[in-house]
Amino acid sequence: MNDTLPATAVTPFVLRSDANAVATLTMNRPESINALSSGMIDALQVELDRIAADPNIRVVVLAAAGKHFCAGHDIAEMQSHRDEAWLAGMFGRCNTMMQTLTRLPQPVIARVHGVATAAGCQLVAQCDLAIAADVARFALPGVNIGLFCSTPAVAVGRNVPRKFAMEMLLTGDMIDAPTALARGLVNRVVPAAELDATIAALAEKIKGKSAVAIRLGKETFYRQVEMGLAGAYVQAGETMTCNVLTEDAAEGMSAFTAKRPPNWPNR
């Protein structure tokens, strides 16, 4: 894919590092504030697809190089492609990538520092969990340049109460990390120096649970949350039935009864 940056042939858009069953994906275009260009979107999709098929990965951390998390879509690239088919294709691939974060069997934690604006804020909202440095800031500023943040609003509007989401969308104003926490956009706010340790501890806790239960539970949570009450209970009941019949659940219940730590068969 074309990109506005000259170094695409030699510099990976996304760096992946695996350690102790945790895959860290680092967006690697700090000079453009890790803008979601075509190249960045496609690179993230490739890595997410690889992780989805990798049973050795239990948790994913989405991080970013440089001083900031992500400034959203690449405005310069969009200016150079004022073509309906190209734009529709780019936004379509971005939508698919965002939904892949939700469909991934592994939980995804956003590691947020600096600014996360527009589609960058969307990335934060789309991840299962988000830990932010106390200096992080968030905005949906598209309205300031005549581009209402309609696609970011999908994810943010499913995390943040409607009135707060609309305020971000209509004003384009920045909110600080404590405000993002209070409104439900992030799970925790910690000093920047403690960001990695906090995420590592959270990942370690998740890794101690049954991978089967987490996969089934994550899939069902996102499916049922879009349903009406009756349909949601049907969906959840079916998943609970399947979950109870797994080897992991049998081991977990036996361990609970015997008052011992579980030894997951499908770790």
Image (cartoon, grey):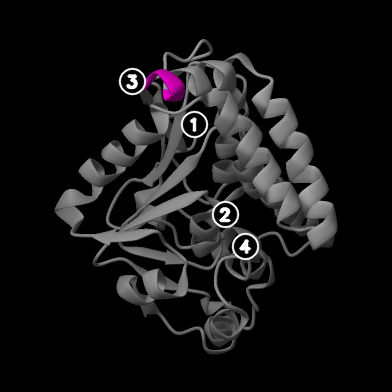
Identity of the residue drawn at 45% across and 32% down: 59
Between 100 and 218, the residue placed more toward the observer is 218
Q: Quadrant of residue 76?
A: bottom right
Marks 1/3: CA–CA distance = 30 Å
Q: Earlier in the sequence, mark 2 or mark 3?
A: 3
| Mark with earlier residue (1, 4) | 1
Structural distance between the alpha carbons of marks 3 and 4: 30 Å
Label 1 to label 4: alpha-carbon separation: 32 Å
Within 10 Å of the Cα at label 4, are there few (<14), some (14-19), or many (20+) other Cα atoms?
many
Outermost residue on the front side: it is: 257
Secondary structure found at label 4 = helix
Q: CA distance from mark 2 to mark 4?
A: 6 Å
Q: Amino acid at mark 3?
A: Asn
137 versus 59 height, above or below: below
Residues drawn in magenta: 256-261
* Residue type (three-letter) at the residue carrying disc 1: Ala
Q: Are marks 1 and 3 in contact (CB under 8 Å)?
A: no
At label 2, counting other C-alpha atoms closer than 10 Å, the crowd grade (few under 14, some 14-19, many 20 or more) is many
Q: Residues within 10 Å of mark 1 (few under 14, many from 20)?
A: few
Q: Amino acid at mark 4?
A: Ala
Asked if disc 2 and disc 4 are in contact, CB closer than 8 Å, the reply is: yes
Neighbours of disc 3 within 10 Å: few (<14), some (14-19), many (20+):
few
Residue 16 visible in the picture: no
The residue wearing badge 1 is 9
Asked whether the residues under the numbered discs 1 and 2 touch, taking CB atoms below 8 Å apart as contact, a structural biologist would say no
Q: Earlier in the sequence, mark 1 or mark 3?
A: 1
The residue at which mark 2 appears reads as 126
Residue 170 highlighted magenta (yes or no):
no
User: According to the image, label 4 marks what residue?
Assistant: 155
